[in-house]
Image (cartoon, rainbow, N blue to C red):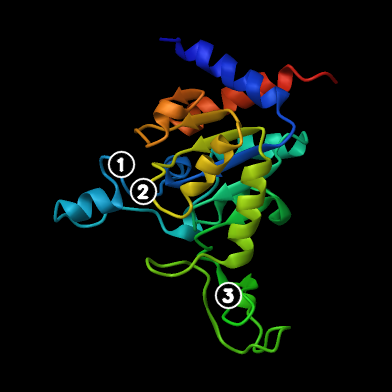
């Protein structure tokens, strides 16, 4: 069994060598910002299944990106982030400074509304009366159970997943489909898979590297090591 420092070094080396790094994030990347996850020991669905009320959570307008979010911004700013796919609706990737064209929010964004005709999204407090496509019906962009994922977001996520030469999963149990099919698509194309998560996932046995720990503690170390090895 590799030590944690060895795993961090291995992950940093893979990321430094990547030509098209794709990152996939779940609720676990945002827990250190004060938001609950869903299937962790005290997660939303875990407590529901035990007949307990939801865990306490900070209001979304009081939540800020944490060190894991900012580490991904560092990768972006150094040209090492090919694409970012997120299951989260908390808008923390956009707040952190991730460029919208590099981000696919598969499950929507609680601060944005969506045109029901063309699927374009708008800031919640700036929704037009009529969309550029002519549509005049808007709803929250957050995807509920049973809803289809937004076509453009999923198509972009799939395209980049198939292009990935390194795939990094952070804070996701990889249990929610069809989002969880994306890392498997990258694996099928031969991309090394790195999983950084506190719990187990169905892809652990196939992962090149599985790092168990908190994203806010470990990801900045991985990214720092990766960037320091780049030739100026």
Res. 95 visible in picture: no
Residue 15, quarter of picture: top right
Seen in the picture, residue 203 relative to 224 is either above or below; the reply is: below
SS at circle 2: loop
Eye-nearest disc, 2 or 3 = 3
Residue at left offset 21%, top offset 51%: 47
Disc number for residue 80: none
Say if mark 2 contacts mark 1, CB within 8 Å. yes
Give the class, few, some or many, for how many residues have Cα within 10 Å of label 2's Cα (few <14, many ≥20): many
Sequence-wise, which precedes: disc 2 or disc 3?
2
Eye-nearest disc, 2 or 1 = 1
CA distance for labels 2 and 1:
9 Å
CA distance for labels 1 and 3:
30 Å
Q: Which residue is mark 2?
A: 36
Q: Check the picture and name the quadrant holding the N terminus.
A: top left
Task: Residue 60: give x, y in percent of width and height.
Answer: 46, 59
In the image shown, does 62 or 119 lie closer to the viewer?
119
Residue 129, quarter of picture: bottom right
Q: Which residue is mark 1?
A: 40
CA distance for labels 2 and 3:
25 Å
Seen in the picture, residue 155 relative to 26 is either above or below; the reply is: below
Sequence-wise, which precedes: disc 1 or disc 3?
1
Give the class, few, some or many, for how many residues have Cα within 10 Å of label 3's Cα (few <14, many ≥20): many
Res. 158 visible in picture: yes
Give the class, few, some or many, for how many residues have Cα within 10 Å of label 1's Cα (few <14, many ≥20): some
Task: Residue 217: give x, y in percent of width and height.
Answer: 49, 27
In the image shown, does 190 or 25 lie closer to the viewer?
190
In the image shown, does 58 or 104 lie closer to the viewer?
104
Q: Which residue is mark 3?
A: 114
SS at circle 1: loop
């Amino acid at each position: 069994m590799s030590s944690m420092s060895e795993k961090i070094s291995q992950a940093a080396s893979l990321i430094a060598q990547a030509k098209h790094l794709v990152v996939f994030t779940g609720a676990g990347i945002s827990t250190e910002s004060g938001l609950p996850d869903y299937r962790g020991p005290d997660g939303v669905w875990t407590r529901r299944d035990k007949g307990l009320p939801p865990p306490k959570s900070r209001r979304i307008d009081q939540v800020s990106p944490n060190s894991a979010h900012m580490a991904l911004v560092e990768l972006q700013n150094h040209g090492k982030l090919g694409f970012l796919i997120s299951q989260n609706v908390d808008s923390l990737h956009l707040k952190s400074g991730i460029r919208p064209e590099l981000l696919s929010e598969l499950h929507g964004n609680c601060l944005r509304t969506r045109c029901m005709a063309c699927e374009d999204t708008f800031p919640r407090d700036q929704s037009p009366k009529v969309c550029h496509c002519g549509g005049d019906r808007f709803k929250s962009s957050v995807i509920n159970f049973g809803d289809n994922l937004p076509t453009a977001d999923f198509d972009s996520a799939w395209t980049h997943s198939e292009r990935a030469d390194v795939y990094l999963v952070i804070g996701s149990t990889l249990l929610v489909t069809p989002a969880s099919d994306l890392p498997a698509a990258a694996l099928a194309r031969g991309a090394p898979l790195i999983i950084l998560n506190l719990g187990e996932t169905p892809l652990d046995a196939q992962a090149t590297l599985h790092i168990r720990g908190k994203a806010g503690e470990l990801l900045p170390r991985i990214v720092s090591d990766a960037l320091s090895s780049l030739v100026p």
